Image (cartoon, rainbow, N blue to C red):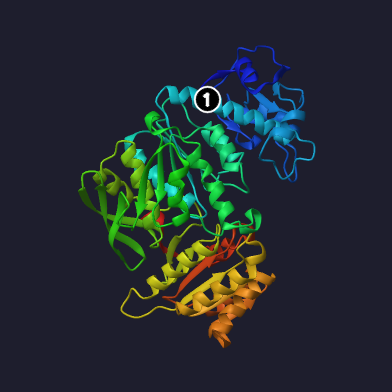
Amino acid sequence: MIPMTLARIADVVGGTLHDVDDPTVEVTGTVEFDSRRIAPGGLFLALPGANADGHDHAAAAVAAGAVAVLAARPVGVPAIVVPSTAAAETNALALEHDADGSGAAVLTGLAKLARAVVDELVDGGLTVIGVTGSSGKTSTKDLIAAVLAPLGPVVAPPGSFNNELGHPWTALRATGDTRFLVLEMSARGPGHIAALAQIAPPRIGAVLNVGTAHLGEFGSQEVIAQTKGELVEALPSKDDGGVAILNADDTLVARMAERTRARVVTVGSSATAAVAAADITLDGDARATFTLVITDHATGNEQCVPVTLAVHGEHQVGNALTAIAIALECGATPQQAAAALSGAAPVSAHRMAVTTRADGVTVIDDAYNANPDSMRAALKALATVARSGPTRRRTFAVLGEMGELGDDSVVEHDAIGRFAVRLDITRIVAVGATRPVRGLFQGAVMEGSWGEEASHVPDADAAIALLRDEVGPGDIVLVKASQSVGLWSVAEALLGNDNAVLETEAAR
């Protein structure tokens, strides 16, 4: 965050100072909602949680070095207090644990603070980039950060920190030295992305895809498309530098060109795409190599550059094209972007993290999140790795529930079970006692996987026991489910201290 006095912060957020002896004291450190992460010069956010209220930790945060607390009520230490009544009613995105509206009040103040800081930094040359989509946001955000890093300092959120708290928190990580602010934008309903775009207005916005993730919350794919398109609607006009990066291979995304004032750059495998991939091949670890084709459709001129990715799965090609298109808009050459991608290994945890144990067992931990599209992509990557060597390796697909699919949940899970069988996955392990998971198991059985080929276990512990009993040298295990399931514990158990790790992404 840029240095800012308590008096100015209070003015920006519409709050009042309490227990502040000197309003000219500056916040020079980071903004934190965890009092254990406070460093000298920081600002602490007093937010309600499931088990504790941040207001109760205000004194500890100040003792740890916080200059003040952004709070909804006086806390006995220096604080900027924001009103909770109007904020609770007007804040479009609410916290889960916020019975009295204090969380909404603090978030509203935080959003105003982030907007003020971003506006000042943009005037100094900062470029704000937003990315959204039903799947692949986090992986793409990481790739964007990687291709922009050679051009200047980049700030991007850790993991999937992409909501009403993570968005402004990330924006406030930017300083006067930051050249690029990359923001992942999520939504639980219409209006959410538009609200996030108001916090840190992007100049460049990318929409990856419109799938069926969160279908239960949105109601239809058309509503999802309408919501994702809020990003391109928020972009400035092409005359003011606005650029929309759209996936030409996704019809619902391609149609968003009609909803933006920004200049449109298309990416994909389509011949109409300005930034395209051709001649895609996968190596033994499902890492893609392709020819990058950049076409100026006005002149017909083409540039072709070879690209080799360090991340796993053919679905990463589309993500990489989006990152390349953004890098080109920010001043990179195609060769610079290709070189950056060649060394861009996975950054965020539990996302296609491939680790091989000393005994040759390969574990693919993609358990951070799941929806029908990403589940199919991960299963295809598993099948590709299995076929890559001189002999076909045995494959285990350990699959948990995909959340937020609404009335279509059982049908979608059934389809995934059938899809895994069609890919000739050796062993399908459905984990969980819910009806959708039973649907996944039944789909596999009905498609022709029975006996020991498909199993249904009640929880992660049972899955771990099964795998420890059955997995042998050379086998490949994919672990995937929605975040709420926490199925990464299975991958972590397989890679525990009792298993020597031969190779990981970090070692490559």
As shown in the figure, which amino acid type bears the numbered disc 1? Answer: Val
Q: Can residue 465 be seen in this view?
A: no
Q: Where is residue 2 in the image (x, y as percent from the top left)?
A: 50, 23
Where on the picture, by quarter, is residue 502? bottom left
- The quadrant of the picture occupied by the C terminus is bottom left
Where on the picture, by quarter, is residue 487? bottom right
Q: Where is residue 466 in the image (x, y as percent from the top left)?
A: 59, 77
Residue at 66% across / 40% down in the picture? 93
Q: How many numbered discs?
A: 1
Residue situated in front as seen by the camera: 225 or 5:
225
The answer to whether 67 appears left or right of 355 in the picture is right
Residue situated in front as seen by the camera: 202 or 437:
202
Residue reaching furthest to the bottom: 451
| Crowd rating for badge 1 (residues with CA inside 10 Å; few <14, some 14–19, many 20+) | many
The vertical placement of 16 against 282, above or below, is above
The answer to whether 292 appears left or right of 182 in the picture is left
The residue pinned by badge 1 equals 117
The vertical placement of 9 against 261, above or below, is above
Where on the picture, by quarter, is residue 124? top left
Residue situated in front as seen by the camera: 331 or 157:
331
The vertical placement of 63 against 217, above or below, is above
Residue reaching furthest to the front: 258
Q: Position of residue 72 (x, y in %)?
A: 74, 28
Q: Where is residue 498 in the image (x, y as percent from the top left)?
A: 52, 66
Residue at 53% across / 86% down in the picture? 448
The vertical placement of 346 against 474, above or below, is above
Q: Is residue 292 visible?
A: yes
The answer to whether 91 appears left or right of 393 in the picture is right
Residue at 65% across / 19% down in the picture? 10
Q: What element carries label 1?
A: helix
